[in-house]
Amino acid sequence: MLDIKLVRENAAQVIKQLGRRGGEDFGLEAVISQDAQRRGMTTASEELLKTRNEMSRKIGEMKKTGGDTEALQAQVREMGDSIKGYEEKLREIEDKIRFSLLCVPNIPNDATPDGKSEADNVEIRRWGTPSELGFAPKSHVELGESLGVLDFPRAAKLSGARFSLYRGAGARLERALINFMLDLHINERGYTEILPPYMVTSETMTGTGQLPKFSQELFKLEGRDLWLIPTAEVPVTNMYAGEILDGEQLPIKMAAHTPCFRSEAGSYGKDTTGLIRQHQFNKVELVKIVKPEDSEAELESLTADAEEILKRLNLPYRVIALCAGDLGFSSARTYDLEVWIPSQGRYREISSCSNFTDYQARRMNLKFKRDKKAKAEFAHTLNGSGLAVGRTVVAIMENCQQADGSITIPEALRPYMGGMERIGKG
């Protein structure tokens, strides 16, 4: 959520910066008008309260001398009613301002490239070279079904479209990747493992920016104020909502594996088969809570941590800086990692690493103090996929496929597969 003081004092600049996202002010003009109305009402209420207090003192003095105070007391009662009326109206308008601000996205960072859509995203670097397989590559769907490790028809029988069912070595590969990712991040990169709830409240969803704007992209439990999480970012970042942290604790680095649940609203016709776009999928998520001056450097290190997984699996990838028009709602700056998918002849997103600055912290009231005497400040939050597990399975199956339809297991993963070197038929 944006700082209302920043909006008030720098309205033209904030609107200009938000315009980089797509040429609109996202309702900010209405927020500015509401804030001016609130400030005017606050001033009027304070003046009325001051007058009432002065009259009350005068009544007290008159009573001491036996004066008639009935008329003045009537005026004081009327003023009290007026003040209550102001308080009710102020609560209403403050609720409107908060709701309006909750629907305004974050301001793009100065380092975020200009642009209107993904076509304007900027490639930062590449790692690895897509190998020449020497034969027409099969898709992971073809490979998985021929090897008997993926069963999409039975998944559809159980749950409908956009669900998957792994069998045998396929299920083991998914599990191995989860453990491999967690071990690297926890044992080598210093993250603390978290196992959070998979269902959270509306307040929690609001804290990280999923609500109120994106309810159609989520799954909600009927008759309960509980939502299935779309990513571990939601519960893990909100762990410290409403708290004031000791600055000595920062940075806080957390890693969590969870299933993720997304309705995929608006994705009709996109990746209708396979593991790329699912209603339920596994992901290892990295979350950081840091001091404001450190967040840009922490974004670079978080991105490097996600990249390391791809490097050790020897999967070719590239890093993309998202332009302002393609940023996520809460993000100020984002890098996407895109892995090479041979059957499609292109790179596809496998991780998104973002710096949210103080946007989420303001929504969830997450602060820190540099020392005991210091004023509490809003922290900065970051997160990134480290990695999306199903998409990593896709990348391994397709990049490591052999002419006979078997799949070679990357060396780094073999200890997690019980020494298995390949997945073949039979």
Image (cartoon, helix red, strand yellow):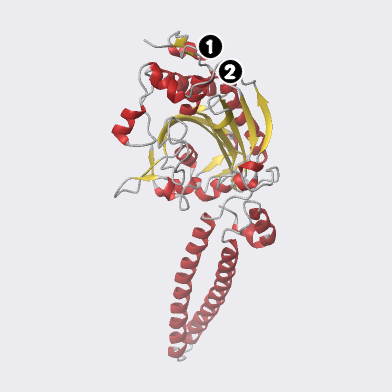
Residue 289 lies, in percent from the top left, at 56, 37
- Asked if residue 69 can be seen in this view, the reply is yes
Total count of labels: 2
Q: Earlier in the sequence, mark 1 or mark 2?
A: 2
Q: Nearer the viewer, residue 366 or 328?
A: 328
Which numbered dot is residue 76? Answer: none
Q: Amino acid at mark 1?
A: Glu
Residues under numbered marks 1 and 2 in contact, where contact means CB atoms less than 8 Å apart? yes
The residue that label 2 is drawn on is 314
Vertical order, 46 against 251 (above or below): below
Vertical order, 217 against 31 (above or below): above
Residue at image x 40%, y 49%?
202
Tell me the quarter of the picture where residue 279 sits.
top left
Q: Report helix, strand or loop for mark 2.
A: loop
Tell me the quarter of the picture where residue 19 sits.
bottom right
Q: Amino acid at mark 2?
A: Asn
Residue at image x 29%, y 32%?
157
- Asked if residue 196 can be seen in this view, the reply is no
The residue that label 1 is drawn on is 411
Residue 170 lies, in percent from the top left, at 40, 19
Residue at image x 47%, y 11%?
404
Quick one: quadrant of the C terminus?
A: top left
Task: Say whether residue 219 is left or right of residue 210.
Answer: left
Q: Report helix, strand or loop for mark 1.
A: helix
Q: Residues within 10 Å of mark 1 (few under 14, many from 20)?
A: some
